[in-house]
Amino acid sequence: MKFGSVENPEAIDFTLPPTHPDTLELLGKYERVKPLEVYVGCAKWNRQDLKGFYPRGTKDELSYYATQFNCIELNATFYNSPDKQQVETWKNKTPADFKFFPKIPQSISHFGRLLNVDEKMTAFCDAIALFEDRLGVSFLQMHDNYKPKDFDRLVRFVEKFSKSVPLAVEVRNAEWFSSDEVAQKLYGLLKKEGVANVLVDALGRRDMLHMRLSTPTAFVRYVGHNHHSDRPRLDEWVERISEWRDAGLQSLYFFVHQHVEIESPILSSYFIDRLNSALGIEVRGPNISFSS
């Protein structure tokens, strides 16, 4: 994942921005009636990208991956919309507590740009619905050149999207975050439709750390830089999530990327270890020891 890459990480202020007041107001409407739902994982299970993660002789990467983590950000569906048989195959390789978070295909988001995509959208939703209780949240990621001038397309897409399939949205163009008027329209739409607003922590795009939630769910895509700053950044996320949990957060979906993905399982495991300790929970992660 090269998005948000920088040549000199030392020049970046890693500090998380303050929580937006709208987020605290939204979370304040919810009570902690049950433990925080937490899913943490990587973006892919491909052996080539995660060389060294799988024990020698592993025949099925997904089956093994699902014993180590409780979810996957399913980037594979971005490149090719899965058919129903493929979804069933994936589902049957995972335990009952595992969840998939499939990315909406680029044929809809990047090539179609949300125009005349109803048939493709329906086919995608019909297929991933077969994940059944293993379906987490699908998410739409728009290209960096998709701007607020085409906001009406997003409105139509979100309104038409299957109400039986949970949805999150990630927009990337800086214009979505530079105007309060535009931001209010976007967050208003997402709140109205019950769609999660994706937060992205990437070094080169700090504007995407808007800290505005549209639902009591935090859907976070964290981009590490294979740099010594990665772990302190995650430590700060643990603190922020603890604050949001106390404020009324109901669910956390947190996915760890690295520019060199081979280290993603290690960094994910570090985050899980710290989160479990801070929140008193037991999220599944690889058995890796970390010094304090």
Image (spheres, helix red, strand yellow):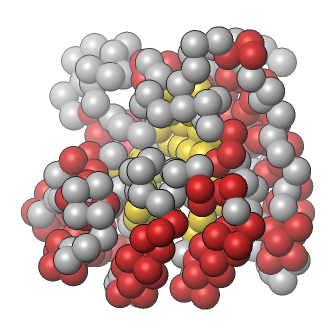
* Residue 64, x across and y down, in percent: 34, 35
Question: 165 or 9: nearer the eye?
Answer: 9
Q: Is residue 126 visible?
A: no
Identify the residue at horizontal 26%, vertical 20% (top origin). Answer: 48
Question: Quick one: quadrant of the N terminus?
Answer: top left
Q: Is residue 138 visible?
A: yes
Asked if residue 47 is positioned above or below residue 250 in the image, the reply reads above
Asked if residue 117 is positioned above or below residue 279 in the image, the reply reads below
Residue 2, quarter of picture: top left
Question: Quick one: quadrant of the C terminus?
Answer: top right
* Residue 145, x across and y down, in percent: 42, 50
Identify the residue at horizontal 67%, vertical 34% (top origin). Answer: 271
Question: 50 or 197: nearer the eye?
Answer: 197
Asked if residue 188 is positioned above or below residue 124 in the image, the reply reads below
Question: 245 or 110: nearer the eye?
Answer: 110
Identify the residue at horizontal 38%, vertical 76% (top origin). Answer: 153
Asked if residue 116 is positioned above or below residue 143 in the image, the reply reads below
Residue 16, quarter of picture: top right
Q: In this image, 41 relative to 10: left or right?
A: left
Q: In this image, 31 relative to 7: left or right?
A: right
Identify the residue at horizontal 63%, vertical 52% (top origin). Answer: 199
Question: 106 or 226: nearer the eye?
Answer: 106
